[in-house]
Structure formats: structure tokens, C-alpha cells
Image: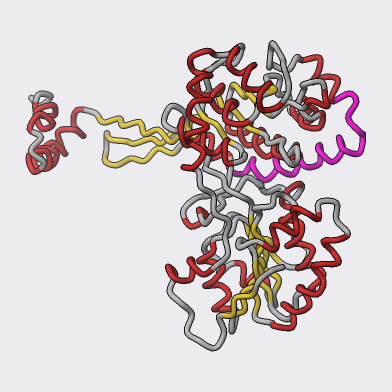
């Protein structure tokens, strides 16, 4: 469990080689496209009837209407355990507080007298939010998706989440309660690739959406790739992952627990410790078996920690450690070192950075106020996590008067002819007296 990679006592490899050395789960989306394509096409052609048949085949639920009735949403919230409702309300409050500061304001720039460019931030009109329900019903994902969409000003929000045979064909009650708490009234009991197809093409009472966000399994991700362009997507999410950068000040009990907590998500989850301390590595390795044995999902955790996507990387110093975690570009990165905040401020590539011993990833999953829908598979090198900005589009308004156009007309003429596009020049020249 947790294989070692020793990068000490030698020059650190370049980024390309280093990326190839580091453990990471492989997700072959292309391999499932042949399965996903006919599912999506069936929904496009036959609509609700196709959804009914596919849901029966994959989920064992036969429902004539996959729209969740308002009465079920009301009942889920009314019967929600008071402690769970309080926790949801606290999570909503914190996430709303952080995301409220992300709202963009329109800006007008005067380029020249009589010529302005205004950048407007306009919300997507309608979004479909996917909430996983496979190995774990992620009711916290309702909060993470819905709150920023609401703050952005999205006027139409629909949620899709898998049905549960043990719940009378309805989705998980906690997911429904979270939807009701946030005022979401349009919820569909449909999961997998078929849910993305419903959002893309429309089916039953669900009208097509403009954008889909939210994590899912490889079939959901493949469907998002397939329908991208017809609708916007946030990202192609892969298996979840955590990296911990630690020195000899880190508590091995904390580190072991944090690696295990992320491995609990999925047998493909990645957990990587990057450390300058061989003693810490030894202590973590000694603690992991006992902690894993005490958990509910020990089988999937053992698979994740023993797989090629997890491991311990030994480095000479923190500079080397930072180079390694930047090459890895983790979805979640914990910094458990001396002067942890200063070290965290040097990180370039990570979906979210958790600073010091009292900021575990689990806090961010639920109630830190940050968003837990984050880039995976190294995509933190170029992409951000879900935010209010995800649901906004920047639109430029160009407003020039006659004099301002005349002042720049000769430059437009030169540039248009340089590109051999004389009609571009003519469209300006025709306006000149």
C-alpha cells in the first residue's frame, strides 16, 4: 500500500518527465464513448420513453415520469434530520458568503473621446446541474453547484441526480432536501449519460439547457464531451485526488487520515504524499493499515491507496516538493509544513490549497465556504474550480460616434488591406463623408 518514489540525491527531472513519474489515475473517456453515444442518440430521438427504458436497464427503476414532484421535495425537507438540515444551512451560508464576493461588475473603458468599450457580465439563462449518486450521494454538491449559479443570476436551474430503487425510484432524500432548502423546484430522477442527454436535447418536461456543470463518473464525463458545443460544460471531471506536501513538522496521524479520506471516494481516487521527511513517510505507512481497517469503506480505500494512482514521493527540500506538486497540479493540495501559508502562496498549480494542520480537505468538501467542484487530472495547470464566473459570460459593447470612427478609419483601412480583406475597409470607408 502506497508505493514510494525516491527523487532525492539527484537533479529533479524536467516537468514532462516528472509528470510521467508521478502516480495518477488514468481515465479513458474515449473507451466509453461507443457506449455513451447510442444512449445520448436514443434520448435525442425518442425523448422521455428512451429515458424510461434506459433508467430501468441501468438503475432498475421504472418510472413513467422522471420529474420529481414538488411534494417529494417538500417531504424530503420536512423529514430531514434536524442536525443534517442545520449542517446544510451552515454550509449554504458559508458558500454563499465566499461566492458573493466573486460577482463581476460591468466596466466601461473610454478608449478615445466618443469611443467606449463596455464589458458586461451576463449570466447563462438556463443550467443543468448534475449531482452524483453512485458510491455516495453527494448532497453537498447541490450546495456547491446551486449557490454560485444563483449568485450569478441564472434564472432557470434544473438538477439531475440518479434514482434509487430503495427509495421508491426517487433520488437520495438528502439530495432532495438540499434542493428544497435552496429553492430548486426542477429536479429529475435520472443519472449517468442519459441525464446529460436530457439536459442537452430536452426530454419529458425538461427543456434543453445552455450549460451543464457538476462532477460525475466516466459515463457522465463522456456524455459532457460528446455534447460539448451543443451546450457548455464546466470541465471533464476525472477521479478525485489529493496531494499533501509535508515536512517533518507534519502530524503523521493527520496526513494518514487525509490520504484515506480522499481514497474513500472511489477505488480510482488518487492520494499522494510529497515529503522531505523519510521519518514522516515511515510513520504514515505504519498508520495507514490500522486507520483503513477502522473505516466503513476499507475495500475501496485499500484499492485506491494500493493502486498506481497513489504513493509517497520523497524529495530533498521544499523547493523540490513545490516543483513536484506544481507538476502534479492536484485537485486538492494540502500544505503541512513550517510557515505553511508562505509555502502555499508559492503554489502555482492546484484546484484548491488547504493551509496548515487545521484545514483538511474534508473541511473544503463541506463547510469551508470554498467550492469543491475542482479540476482533476492535472487540469489545474490551466483551469479553475466552479465559481460564480463559471455561469457568467463577458460581452463587449462597442460604442463609437462618427468622429471617433473617422479618427481611427485609416488604421482600420491599413490593417484590413494587410489581411487582404478589402470589404472590411469598405465597411468603414462607406461611413466617411
Left or right of 276 on screen, residue 72: right
**Percent position of residue 244, x then y:** 67, 67
**Location of residue 215 with respect to 266 vertically, above or below:** above
Which residue does the image show at 66% across and 47% down from the upper left? 372
**Percent position of residue 177, x then y:** 80, 28
Of residues 32 and 320, the one nearer the viewer is: 32
Left or right of 247 on screen, residue 212: left
Decide whether residue 97 is among the magenta residues.
yes
Q: Which residues are magenta?
A: 77-102
Left or right of 74 on screen, residue 212: left
Would residue 69 be seen by someone viewing this image from the given angle? yes
Q: Quadrant of the C terminus?
A: top left
Of residues 215 and 182, the one nearer the viewer is: 215
Q: Quadrant of the N terminus?
A: bottom right
Magenta span main SS: helix
**Percent position of residue 91, x then y:** 77, 42
Which residue does the image show at 76% across and 31% down from the upper left? 175
Amino acid at each position: 500500500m502506497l508505493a514510494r518514489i525516491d527523487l532525492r540525491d539527484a537533479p529533479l527531472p524536467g516537468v514532462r518527465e516528472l509528470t510521467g513519474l508521478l502516480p495518477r489515475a488514468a481515465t479513458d473517456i474515449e473507451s466509453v464513448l461507443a457506449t455513451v453515444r447510442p444512449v445520448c442518440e436514443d434520448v435525442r430521438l425518442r425523448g422521455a420513453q428512451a429515458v424510461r427504458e434506459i433508467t430501468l436497464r441501468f438503475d432498475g427503476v421504472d418510472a413513467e415520469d422522471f420529474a420529481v414532484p414538488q411534494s417529494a421535495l417538500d417531504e424530503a425537507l420536512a423529514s430531514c434530520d434536524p442536525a443534517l438540515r442545520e449542517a446544510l444551512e451552515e454550509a449554504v451560508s458559508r458558500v454563499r458568503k465566499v461566492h458573493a464576493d466573486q460577482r463581476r461588475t460591468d466596466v466601461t473603458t473610454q478608449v478615445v473621446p466618443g469611443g467606449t468599450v463596455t464589458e458586461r457580465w451576463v449570466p447563462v439563462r438556463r443550467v443543468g446541474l448534475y449531482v452524483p449518486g453512485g458510491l455516495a450521494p453527494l448532497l453537498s454538491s447541490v450546495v456547491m453547484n446551486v449557490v454560485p449559479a444563483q449568485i450569478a443570476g441564472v434564472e432557470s436551474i434544473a438538477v439531475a441526480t440518479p434514482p434509487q430503487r430503495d427509495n421508491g425510484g426517487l433520488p437520495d432524500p438528502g439530495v432532495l432536501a438540499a434542493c428544497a432548502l435552496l429553492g430548486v423546484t426542477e429536479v429529475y430522477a435520472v443519472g449517468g449519460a442519459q441525464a446529460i442527454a436530457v439536459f442537452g436535447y430536452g426530454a419529458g418536461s425538461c427543456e434543453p439547457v445552455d450549460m451543464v456543470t457538476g462532477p460525475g463518473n466516466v459515463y457522465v464525463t463522456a456524455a459532457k464531451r460528446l455534447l460539448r458545443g451543443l451546450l457548455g460544460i464546466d470541465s471533464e471531471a476525472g477521479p478525485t485526488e489529493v496531494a499533501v506536501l509535508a515536512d517533518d513538522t507534519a502530524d503523521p496521524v493527520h496526513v494518514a487520515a487525509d490520504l484515506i479520506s480522499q481514497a474513500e471516494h472511489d477505488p480510482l481516487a488518487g492520494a499522494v504524499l510529497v515529503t522531505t521527511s523519510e521519518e514522516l513517510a515511515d510513520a504514515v505507512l505504519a498508520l495507514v493499515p490500522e486507520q483503513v481497517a477502522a473505516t466503513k469503506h476499507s475495500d475501496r480505500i485499500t484499492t485506491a491507496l494500493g493502486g498506481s494512482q497513489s504513493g509517497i514521493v520523497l524529495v530533498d527540500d521544499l523547493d523540490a516538493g513545490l516543483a513536484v506538486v506544481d507538476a502534479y497540479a492536484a485537485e486538492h493540495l494540502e500544505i503541512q509544513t513550517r510557515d505553511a501559508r508562505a509555502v502555499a502562496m508559492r503554489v502555482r498549480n492546484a484546484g484548491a490549497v488547504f493551509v496548515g494542520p487545521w484545514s483538511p480537505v474534508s473541511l473544503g468538501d463541506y463547510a469551508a465556504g470554498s467550492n469543491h467542484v475542482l479540476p482533476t487530472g492535472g487540469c489545474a495547470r490551466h483551469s479553475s474550480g466552479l465559481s460564480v464566473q463559471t455561469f457568467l459570460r463577458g460581452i463587449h459593447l462597442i460604442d463609437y460616434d462618427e468622429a471617433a470612427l473617422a479618427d481611427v478609419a485609416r488604421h482600420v483601412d491599413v490593417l484590413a488591406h494587410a489581411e487582404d480583406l478589402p470589404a472590411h475597409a469598405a465597411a468603414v470607408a462607406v461611413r466617411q463623408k
